[in-house]
Image (tube, helix red, strand yellow):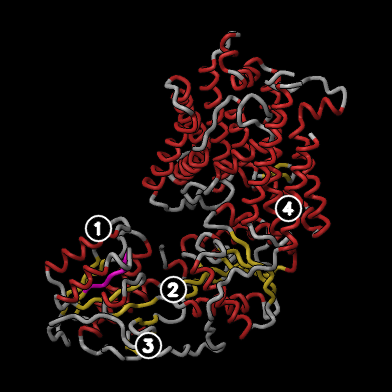
Amino acid sequence: MIRKTLFAAAALAAMAGSAFAASAWTGGDDLPTNPLACDGTAGAAAAKPYDGGEPTGAPDRKGKKITVVDVPKLIGIGYFNATSKGIADAAKELGNVDAKTDGPTQANIDQQITFIDNYITSGVDGILFAANDPVAIAPVLKKALSKGINVVGYDANSQPDARQWFVNQAEFNGIAKAMVDNLAKEIGEEGAFAIVTSTFTTPNQARWIAEMAAYAEKCHPKMKWLETVEAQEDNVLSFNQATTLINKYGDELKGIFGMTSVATPASAEAVTQANKCGTIAVVGLATPNAMKPYVEKDCVKSVVLWNPVDLGYAAMQVLRAVADGDLKPGATSVKAGKLGELQVINGSEILLGAPFVFSKENIGQFDF
Amino acid sequence: MSDIALPVRRPSSFARLFEAYGQEIVVLAAIVVLFAIVGLVNPRFLSDTNLTSIFSGNAYIAVAAIGMAMVIISGHIDVSVGSLIGVLATIAGTLAVSGYPIWVAWLVPVLVGIAINTCLGALIAYMRIPSIVATLGMLSILKGGLISATGGTWITGMPPGFFIAQARLFGIPSPVYFMVVLTILVALWMRYSATGRSIYAVGGNAEAARASGLNPERTCVLVFALHGFFAGIAALLFATQLQVIQSTVPPNLELTVITAAVIGGVSILGGTGTVIGSTLAAILFACIGSALIFLNVSAYWLRAVLGLLILATVLADMARRRRGLSP
C-alpha cells in the first residue's frame, strides 16, 4: 500500500514539476516571419524567377474560343461546387470560353489522373486542376503541356514545372493579418486573447500563429496573448480546452482564435454554452456551414477563409490570360476581370488577394 | 487471502477498508490533492463552472469505462470501444437529422451497441478467439466502415430536443447523473448479485468457476452485451454534447477508457477491481487535463502522466498479487 501511494505521489510530483519547468509556449514555428503592413498595402513580392512550365507547340489562341476542363480534387462537395461556379461565372463573362467541371467523386489521385488523361486524349485547350497530390499529378500535367495545352492550378498546387501558373488562395501573412485585425476590431486594442490550435507541430497552424504573433506585435502591440492550447482535430477536446480557457481566465479573456475548422466551431460552442456570447469574441479559420449557427445567433462575427467562388473565377481568368498570351513569365501582375489586378508571387503563383471574411451578411450565400 | 480479492464486507477498520478499496482511495486522494494544488495556484479551478465542465465534459469516458471495467474484470479486453462510440454517435445523429422521433435516435444506438458487442462476446466465448484479436478486428471494421459510409462529413442541424447531454437538473448537467447513477448501480450489482459476483469468479479463474457450476461463456457474452449498453449511453452523451457530430472515431478514446479502468484498480489479469475505481480514475483524467491548462503545461504531458500512472498502478497490482500468494 505504502509503495502504491508512493508511486502515485511520484507521478503527481513529476506532473507538478513539469508544470513549473514548462515555459509559455506560443505554438508558432521558428521560421522567419513577414508581417504585412498595418494599413493593408500589399506585401513586397520577393523577386523570384518564373519557375512554372511551358506548353510546347501551343497554337495561337488569342481571342479564339477555347475549351477548358476543370478537374478538382473531387466533385459533389460544397467547396468545389463553389469553385466550379466561379469558373462558370468567369467563362460566361469572358464569352469565348467553353468550360466544364468533371472529376472523381472521391479525393483520389489515381482517378484524377485518369480524368485528366482522358481529357488530354479528347482534346482540350486548357486544364484547370486542384491536385490531390503535388508529385503524383505532375507527369500527367507535363503530358498536357507537351501537347500544347495550357495548364493552371488552383487551391492545391502541383510541382511548379508541371503547370504554368497556380492561383494561391491565401498566404500565411495575409491570413494572419485578417485574423488579428478582425479580433482587434471586436475586442479592442488592449484585449486579451487565447488560441485553440490543432497541435504545436502542425505546419500550417504553426506558420499562421508565428505570422499572427509578428503581425500583432507590429500593428496591435497592446493586445495581450494569454496562451495557446492544443486540441488536435478533435471536436470534444477542442470544446473542453476552450471551456477550460474560459474558466481559467474569467473576465480577462476577451477573445479566442480558432486555428482549424474543428477548433473554431468548438470554441464558438464553448462560448455559447458558457453564456459568454457578446463578451468573448471568437475569430477563426473555418468553413461557413459549420459556423452558420453561431454567426446567425451573433455569437461569432468574423470567420476567416477565402472565397472559393472568387478562387475559381480567378483561375479561369488566369487561364484565359495565359491562352491569350497576356500573362507571360516574368509578369508581376495579371488582370482578373471583376477582381481587378492580381499580384504574382513566388515566381509562378498568383495571389487571390486578402482573405475573405464571412459575416452575418454574406454567410448564407455559401454552402460548403 | 485468496488470489481473487473480492471486496470484503467488513469495513470494521480503516485497514480493512483500504485493503478492499486501496486503489480507489489512492485515486480519490490524488483527485483531492490535485484540486488542492491547482486551486491554490488559481482559485478559479475550483469555481462551480469549472467543476461542472470537468465532471460533465468527461462523463462519457466514465460511463464507457464502467463497461470496460466489467470486461477487464471478466478476464478480457476490448480495444474497439472508441470506434464503437464513434459509430453509435454517428447513427444517433443521422437518425436525428433524418426526422425520426428523438427517442428513436436515442434508443437505436444503444440497441445497436448491445447487438454488436453481443456478437463480439459470442465470438470470443464460443469461437475461442482471444479478445484482443477479436476486438482489434472489430476496431478496423468499425473505423474503416465509418469513414467509408460518411466520407468524414459532419452531422449538423439536429433538432433542439436531441441534446440530452446539455440538459440540466437542479443546475447539474445530465451527464453527471448518468455517470453517478450508473456507477452506483453497477457497483452494487457486481458486489451483491450472484451474476455480478460470477464475473469476478470467471475473471479470476475460469476453470475453477466452471468447476463450481458457473458458465464462463455465458458470462462473457453477458459482460460484452452490458459493455455494449454502456458504450451506447456513452455515445449518446458524446454525440449530444455539441451541436456538431464529427462522424469520425474520436482519437485514442479506447486507450483513455482502458486506462481509466486500469488506473481505477481493475487488474489487467482479471478478477479484481470495481467500477467505482474506474469512474474515479476517469474523473482524475478530466482533472489532470483541465489542470494542465491552469498550470500552463502542454497537453502532451497528459499522455505522459497517464503512462506514468498506468505503470505505477500495474506495478502496485503485481506487488499486491505477490504478497497475496506468499502470505
Three-letter amino acid code at the position of disc 4: Ala
Q: Which residue is mark 1?
A: A111
Cα–Cα span, label 3 and label 2: 25 Å
- To the question of a shared chain for discs 3 and 2, the answer is yes
- Image position of B9 (left or right of A231): right
Q: Is residue B2 above or below residue B87?
A: above
- The disc at residue A14 is 4
- Image position of A290 (left or right of B298): left
Magenta segment: A127-132
Assign the C terminus of chain A to one quadrant of the image: bottom left
Cα–Cα span, label 1 and label 4: 52 Å
Which numbered disc, 2 or 1, marks the residue closer to the eye?
1
Q: Earlier in the sequence, mark 3 or mark 2?
A: 3
Q: Secondary structure at mark 2?
A: loop
Which percent across, then down, holds residue B138?
44, 35
Q: Secondary structure at mark 3?
A: loop
Q: Residue at x 49, y 65 (%)?
A: A286
Q: Residue at x 35, y 59 (%)?
A: A77
Q: Residue at x 55, y 44 (%)?
A: B253
- Image position of A5 (left or right of A291): right
